[in-house]
Image: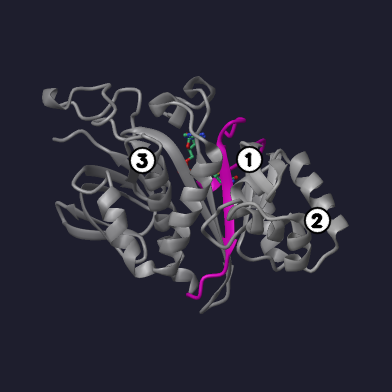
């Protein structure tokens, strides 16, 4: 968004301001203010002229300006109705030197999960990538995946979804919580959700770094928001299916605000993660690049490893695909 328009919106946040007063505060001409007010109207803002000045009466449903308006975190937003992958676009911006930018899309046509798996991203979802530069070595990057999972779970809970985190990068509605199976009969895992729980969101973190310092980090978050579950792969769920449609503008704001707070306080992430984890206390099977590890997930360790108690002792697992198993 144009800088003057951004500053204008910031002024209008706190109530009516007259055109001449705005021109003075922003150090531009009155004609420039009028032009930017028209541009905001074109973007879907209901800007009304009252006796006391301009007032924002309505905000558009979604988009860059909609998310930036009232956002309590210092990100600028680049919005696309449709894009290949927000992570790919984020990578372009990161390489060009941009930081603290969020790429946001209504629909993606070439989005990815880990190991280049396909990710479905139909219109109505929340598909975004945050580009930033944490002051840490590359080895610490997983803490930001955990932070994004916590932020997503919190935003989803506020939207009425019983969301929890499955290590390492999923936000799910646990099979035990979604009402589709009765925990009292001892069957804790839903048959349609073989890896345990229905997947609401996934996170894909990518980065560039030198030996001791991250140059840029990109946290891609995909949330099935206002999407029909049958438009998604088997085993997936959506905010719409669990709790009804959400105001995506507010959902994205909450997610970004929570993420930003945790980004600033990495030492708080593990406790927050434990609070929202579905994986801890469960029997798990983890496929790593080289082996399969089975046991009970007992804790999470910095920067994002799962601690698993196995028959052969305790293991700290740094990466892999995790399955929640039925209790023995
Ligand atoms: C992930 O990978 O869960 C990471 C997904 C990250 C997507 C975001 S969207 C914004 C940004 N831009 C991108 O291009 N990507 C990021 P993984 O753990 O590997 O899980 C992938 C698996 O999830 C697939 O193999 C499918 O089985 C399943 N899947 C695909 N689309 C899904 C969806 N919309 N909801 C739930 N599950 C899905």
Q: Residue at x 67, y 63 (%)?
A: 94
Q: Quadrant of the N terminus?
A: bottom right
| Ligand 1 lies under 8 Å from the Cβ of mark 1 | no
Q: Residue 46 in the image: state x and y as whole percent.
A: 69, 39
Which residue is identified by label 3? 157
Badge 1 element: strand
Viewer-proximal residue among 134 and 312: 134
Residue highlighted by disc 2: 33
User: Which disc, if any, is residue 57?
Assistant: 1
From this viewpoint, is residue 117 visible? no
Residue 229 seen: yes
Of labels 3 and 2, earlier in sequence is 2
Q: What secondary structure is found at the residue carrying circle 2?
A: helix
SS class, disc 3: helix
**Numbered mark located on residue 244 in the image:** none
Callout 1: 10 Å neighbours few (<14), some, many (20+)? few
Which of the two discs, 3 and 1, sits closer to the camera?
1
Residue 153, located in which quarter of the rendered image?
A: top left
Rendered-image quadrant of the C terminus: top left
Contact between labelled residues 2 and 3, with CB atoms less than 8 Å apart: no
Is the CB of the residue bearing disc 2 within 8 angstroms of ligand 1?
Answer: no
Cα–Cα gap, marks 3 and 2: 40 Å
User: Which is in the foreground here, disc 3 or disc 2?
Assistant: 2
Q: Report the residue at 33% width, 29% height from top.
A: 194
CA distance separating discs 3 and 1: 28 Å
Q: Position of residue 169 (x, y in %)?
A: 41, 48
Closer-to-camera residue (3/245): 3
Q: Residue at x 29, y 27 (%)?
A: 178
């Amino acid at each position: 968004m144009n800088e003057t328009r951004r500053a204008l919106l910031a002024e209008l946040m706190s109530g009516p301001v007259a055109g001449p007063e705005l021109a003075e505060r922003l150090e531009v001409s009155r004609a420039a203010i009028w032009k930017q007010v028209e541009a905001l109207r074109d973007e879907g803002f209901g800007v009304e002229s009252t006796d006391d000045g301009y007032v924002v009466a309505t905000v558009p449903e979604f988009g860059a300006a909609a998310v930036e308006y009232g956002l309590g975190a210092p990100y600028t937003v680049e919005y696309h109705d449709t894009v290949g992958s927000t992570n790919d676009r984020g990578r372009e911006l990161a390489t060009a030197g941009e930081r603290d930018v969020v790429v946001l899309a209504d629909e993606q046509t070439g989005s990815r999960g880990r190991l280049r798996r396909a990710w479905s991203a139909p219109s109505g979802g929340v598909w975004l990538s945050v580009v930033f530069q944490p002051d840490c070595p590359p080895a610490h990057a997983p803490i930001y995946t955990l932070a994004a999972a916590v932020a997503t779970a919190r935003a989803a809970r506020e939207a009425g979804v019983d969301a929890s985190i499955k290590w390492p990068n999923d936000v799910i509605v646990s099979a035990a919580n979604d009402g589709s199976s009765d925990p009292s009969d001892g069957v804790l895992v839903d048959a349609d959700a073989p890896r345990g729980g229905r997947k609401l969101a996934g996170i894909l973190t990518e980065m560039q770094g030198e030996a001791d310092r991250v140059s840029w980090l990109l946290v891609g978050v995909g949330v099935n928001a206002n999407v029909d579950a049958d438009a998604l792969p088997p085993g997936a769920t959506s905010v719409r299916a669990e709790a009804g449609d959400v105001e995506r503008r507010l959902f994205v704001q909450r997610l970004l605000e929570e993420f930003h707070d945790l980004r600033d306080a990495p030492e708080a992430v593990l406790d927050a993660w434990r609070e929202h984890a579905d994986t801890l206390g469960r029997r798990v099977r983890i496929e790593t690049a080289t082996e399969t590890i089975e046991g009970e997930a007992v804790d999470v360790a910095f920067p994002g490893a799962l601690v698993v108690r196995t028959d052969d002792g305790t293991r700290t697992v740094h990466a892999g695909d995790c399955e929640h198993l039925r209790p023995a």
